[in-house]
Amino acid sequence: MIATINYWARHYQSVWLERAADPSLADWLRLACLAFAKHRANGHANFAPGELGRLLAKPGPDGQLKPLTKSAVSNAIKRAKDRGWISKESTAQCLVVPPHAIAGGCGKHYEACRVHPYRNSLKRQTDLRSA
Ligand SMILES: [Zn+2]
């Protein structure tokens, strides 16, 4: 087995938010950028119902911003999951960044997620046992 060095660097979440706002990018990529822009130390990014659609709004033919429909948001989530940019447990209320992709962020890594409370409490128990 060959050991892989996994270098890391810090990234500003505001830059991911700027990228998410670019309507020329694919919806799934903009959504994944939102996950990286908004995740907390536990890797979860919570959104209010309809918030993702509003954040991913695109200009319509009249130039006015139109929120993404619920089904367009669902498709973007599916595509981002299929490409491995967000974890399979992600929903329209919580986008989860793959744990191997990030470290740090606001809050605590064991902080409970309001959408995935059971999963996080298991992670916290595991972390406490191994500490
Ligand atoms: Zn969550």
Image: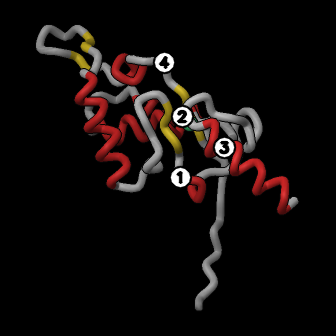
Q: Amino acid at mark 1?
A: Pro
* Identity of the residue drawn at 29% across and 28% down: 23
- Residue at the right extreme of this rendering: 131
Distance, label 2 to label 3, CA atoms, is 20 Å
Is the residue at mark 3 in contact range of ligand 1, meaning its CB lies under 8 Å from it?
yes
Name the residue tied to disc 1: 98
Taking the image as shown, residue 8 lies to the left or right of residue 87, namely right
* Identity of the residue drawn at 43% across and 18% down: 49
Chain-order first, disc 4 or disc 2: 2
Name the residue tied to disc 3: 120
Is label 2 in a helix, a strand or a loop? helix
Tell me where residue 20 sits by quadrant.
Answer: top left
Distance, label 3 to label 1, CA atoms, is 14 Å
Image position of 4 with respect to 103: above or below = below
Is the residue at mark 1 in contact range of ligand 1, meaning its CB lies under 8 Å from it?
no
Structural crowding at the residue carrying mark 4, measured as other residues with C-alpha within 10 Å and reported as few (<14), some (14–19) or many (≥20): few
Q: Nearer the viewer, mark 3 or mark 1?
A: 3
Distance, label 4 to label 2, CA atoms, is 16 Å
Name the residue tied to disc 4: 48
Distance, label 4 to label 3, CA atoms, is 19 Å
Image region (quadrant) for ligand 1 = top right
* Identity of the residue drawn at 42% across and 41% down: 32
Q: Amino acid at mark 4?
A: Ala
Name the residue tied to disc 2: 37
